[in-house]
């Protein structure tokens, strides 16, 4: 039975959701995007902290079908990235398909009438769709730190992903907790503005230098007029990132990490003049174990007279500031918590109920996992972009989502042509992938002994542990034997 008019629900209008919409539109298919906020952009809409920028080259951080000659910087500020996504939505007329302010609360698989998903939102919408594409992001649910006295502070306090722009920053005494990619970017921006910035570092970071290079008008004009130039640049940057850097960095025990450690150590030596501060900033674990920090200004900012790097442990938060375990009270007006995200939530807390009443929360009660990072056994016609075990942090998220969407479209074609009544990974295939993934994960640099958001509750890295070419090969064509295709 051919299916001429299938309906798709896309959850989330961030980078992956917009991509899904463009691809479904291109295929002439009907879709609705459910977006809980009132704007597109996902992480780039949510994160508006001072200093936010993309720390991978802008020309990689672009859809391959929508290269952008207008990037102003080699690595662009967050506002430019947000405008880029808004521009793509405008250009493709995606807006008309988005239900803004509609948080999906549940989705139930209903086997009647050939199977479909009943999707409900907090706003009272309820509708049936043939397929669901969850594009809900990974670094999405802010994580408050487990620090005593969080509610006792009398000043302003917020998470980096929930920035309160009404709070005046200039000249203020600011405590910044966290030195991940976010905390280091905020340090670069707030160091020169704060009266005093107390930066609370629990673990030193490997900081890879990247100059902040602006594209000249001539360069942008060349990109505008020569599409091949832009395409070649995208390809060249993608190749060197994926098959050079990204694939090597996850492989524990290669000389690549030691070579990079040498480069970073040299930058640390040359840039940080005070030997005591330098040693506080020197990491004591293998480079790449935590997500690398890429920065052009962190070491400069941390040496400003207005900035103090605090490495004593935080004992508690009090009405007037942060008390460290040496007994000192760091009195501040504002506390910024750049303490990361719950990376194991994905679509949750939505209630997703698959075939035979299978509840996603139960399936994922220990930890989330997905066959090839895309699908879950028992959840027919339900696929994720940048879901669990996706190469988050090692490959370009956009390239990843594009390959995943191309793969999903092949499954959609199979179902549309009537060759499949429904599509979801077979239990054995999912288990086989999970076993292989876990074994490979143990050999990655992420498992060499450090605390990071890559590790699951067992201490096993959850991200895609194989090289880029394996991902490319897997995404090129679904292995149909790995799927259940009957109701
Ligand atoms: P993160 O990498 O998880 O860093 C959280 C920071 O908070 C760490 O320094 C952590 O210390 C510290 N922390 C957490 N709980 C603490 C506590 N109780 N006491 C003291 N310190 C505590 O979070 P993030 O910096 O927001 O970055 C998350 C990811 O977002 C990045 O790794 C990256 O993938 C992405 N990101 C990307 C960009 C970009 O430019 N593309 C920018 C920002 C973020 P420990 O290190 O000791 O755990």
Image: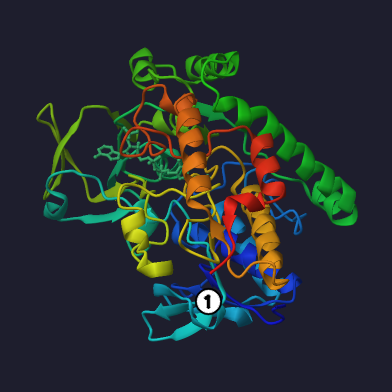
Q: At 77% across and 46% down in the image, what residue appears?
A: 216
- Residue 206 visible to an observer of this rendering: no
Q: Residue at x 62, y 33 (%)?
A: 211
Q: Position of residue 110 (x, y in %)?
A: 45, 77
Nearer-the-camera pick, 20 or 307? 20
User: Relative to residue 157, is residue 75 drawn left or right?
Assistant: right
Residue visible at 45% across and 79% down? Answer: 118
Q: Specify the quadrant of the image occupied by residue 201.
A: top left
> On screen, 441 above or below 166?
above
Residue 282 against residue 177 in the figure, above or below: above
Q: Which residue, given by chain and number where applicable, does mark 1 sit on?
A: 115
Percent position of residue 143, x then y: 31, 50
Task: Please state the horizontal and vertical placement of residue 41, each as a whole percent of the image.
Answer: 54, 64
Image quadrant for the N terminus?
Answer: bottom right
Q: Residue at the spot x=53%, y=46% of the render? A: 429
Q: Left or right: where does residue 318 sit relative to residue 98?
A: left
- Say few, some or many: other residues with alpha carbon within 10 Å of mark 1 (under 14 / 14 to 19 / 20 or more): some
The quadrant of the rendered image in which ligand 1 is seen is top left
Q: Is residue 329 visible?
A: yes
């Amino acid at each position: 039975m051919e299916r001429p008019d299938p309906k798709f629900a896309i959850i989330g209008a961030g980078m992956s959701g917009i991509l899904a919409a463009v691809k479904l539109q291109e295929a002439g298919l009907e879709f609705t995007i459910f977006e809980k906020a009132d704007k597109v952009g996902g992480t780039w809409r949510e994160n508006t902290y001072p200093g936010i920028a993309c720390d991978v080259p802008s020309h990689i951080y672009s859809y391959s079908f929508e290269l952008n000659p207008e990037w102003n910087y080699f690595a662009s500020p967050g506002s430019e990235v947000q405008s880029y996504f808004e521009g793509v939505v405008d250009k493709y007329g995606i807006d008309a398909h988005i239900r803004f302010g509609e948080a999906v609360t549940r989705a139930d698989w209903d086997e009647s009438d050939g199977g479909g998903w009943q999707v409900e939102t907090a706003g009272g919408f309820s509708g049936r769709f043939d397929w669901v594409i969850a594009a809900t992001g990974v670094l999405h649910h802010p994580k408050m730190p487990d620090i005593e006295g969080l509610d006792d502070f009398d000043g302003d306090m917020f998470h980096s992903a929930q920035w309160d722009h009404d709070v005046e920053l200039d000249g203020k005494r600011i405590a910044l907790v966290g030195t991940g990619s976010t905390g280091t970017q905020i340090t670069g921006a707030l160091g020169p503005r704060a009266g005093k910035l107390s930066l609370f570092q629990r673990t030193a970071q490997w900081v890879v230098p990247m100059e902040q290079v602006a594209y000249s008008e001539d360069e942008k004009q060349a990109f505008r007029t020569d599409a091949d130039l832009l395409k070649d640049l995208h390809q060249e940057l993608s190749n060197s990132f994926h098959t050079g850097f990204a694939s090597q960095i996850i492989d524990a025990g290669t000389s690549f990490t030691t070579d990079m450690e040498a480069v970073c150590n040299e930058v640390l030596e040359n840039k940080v003049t005070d030997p005591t501060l330098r040693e506080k900033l020197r990491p004591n674990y293998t480079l790449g174990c935590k997500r690398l920090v890429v920065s052009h200004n962190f070491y400069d900012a941390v040496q400003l007279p207005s900035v103090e790097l605090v490495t004593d442990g935080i004992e508690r938060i009090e009405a007037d500031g942060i008390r460290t375990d040496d007994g000192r009270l760091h009195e501040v007006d504002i506390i910024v918590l750049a303490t990361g995200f719950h990376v194991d939530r994905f679509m949750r807390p939505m209630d997703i109920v698959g075939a035979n009443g299978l509840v996603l929360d139960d399936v994922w009660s220990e930890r989330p996992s997905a066959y090839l990072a895309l699908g879950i056994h028992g959840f027919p016609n339900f696929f994720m972009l940048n879901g669990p075990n996706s190469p988050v942090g090692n490959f370009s998220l956009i390239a990843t989502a594009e390959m995943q969407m191309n793969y999903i479209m092949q499954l959609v074609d199979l179902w549309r042509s009537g060759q499949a009544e429904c599509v979801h990974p077979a239990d054995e295939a999912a288990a086989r992938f999970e076993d292989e993934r876990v074994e490979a994960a143990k050999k990655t640099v992420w498992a060499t002994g450090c605390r990071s958001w890559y590790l699951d509750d067992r201490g096993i890295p959850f991200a895609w542990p194989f090289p880029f070419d394996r991902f490319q090969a897997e995404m090129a064509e679904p292995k149909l034997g790995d799927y259940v295709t009957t109701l």
